[in-house]
Image (cartoon, rainbow, N blue to C red):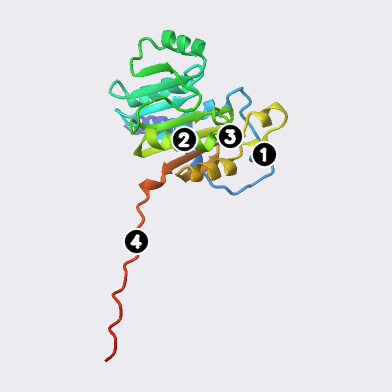
Amino acid sequence: MRDIRRVLSGLMLVSLVCAPILVRADSGESTRIADEKQLARTLSTGYPYREKSEYVLKELDLKPGDVVVDIGAGDGWWSEKMAEAVGPQGVVHAGEVAEGKVDQMKKRFAELPQLKPYLCPTDGTGLEENSCDLAFLSKTYHHLDKDGQVAYLRQLCKVLKPTGRLVVIEHYRELGVGRARDHAWSPGLLTQQAEEAGWILLRSELITGTHHFIAIFAQKEAFPLKQPEKKPPAAEKG
């Protein structure tokens, strides 16, 4: 009997040692810099932020039945993951300005009916007002017309529901060099433009292991402003 207990105890110890370590989401990690290499880029693929998809999807917090517009969906990589999250009762509008990419996505995701690739205009989404729960732009914002970005963000306020959110992933411009700097954006400038368009920043942070950031916004209308109560005028002394 003792031998069996020893074996079971040993197996339990091995399972604990070999169990995968659960890494907290980026927003739960400390910002303290313990050494000079802590913030170095460690993910070197062409799309390093895709390697942190579990973290990004956790930040999106999509629910079954949600309606998402993926602006500049590209090959549909993020659209597919979001379509799985919203389920058959939800919708992911995968918008692209290149008809060839739209056709490719239609063929690739033919058996995923909630993922709907479509030809997207360059000055907006082309979707109905008050129809989406989330607008997602991954490495797309810097492609928008520089003189029309605020207007574009303002138009998104109409397309999204009052409780809808805006999520932007971009290369941090100040951390880019050469061509990477040209295909990037500053989180500070993004926040400034978003606020001008009626959005309020909920969270903005660097995606660890990359030089990309994620910024999440809500509409200003989602923050009810309580007017201060007016005090009755003091009675005049007779």
Q: In this figure, which residue is indicated by the disc labeled 3?
A: 147
**Circles 4 and 1: CB distance less than 8 Å?**
no
> Quarter-wise, where is residue 126 in the image?
top left
Could you tell me which quadrant the C terminus lies in?
bottom left
Residue 90 relative to residue 20: left or right: left
In this rendering, is residue 94 above or below 34?
above
Query: Alpha-carbon distance for marks 4 and 1?
Result: 40 Å
Query: Alpha-carbon distance for marks 2 and 4?
Result: 30 Å
Query: Alpha-carbon distance for marks 3 and 1?
Result: 21 Å
Dot 3: what SS? loop
Q: Amino acid at mark 1?
A: Glu
Q: 232 and 43: which one is in front?
A: 232
Q: In this figure, which residue is indicated by the disc labeled 4?
A: 227
Marking on residue 174: 1
Query: Alpha-carbon distance for marks 3 and 4?
Result: 35 Å
Front disc: 3 or 4: 3
Q: Amino acid at mark 2?
A: Val
Q: Closer to the N terminus: mark 2 or mark 3? A: 3
Front disc: 4 or 1: 4
Residue 37 lies, in percent from the top left, at 68, 40
**Circles 2 and 3: CB distance less than 8 Å?**
no
Q: Closer to the N terminus: mark 3 or mark 4? A: 3
**Circles 3 and 1: CB distance less than 8 Å?**
no
Front disc: 2 or 4: 4
Marking on residue 167: 2
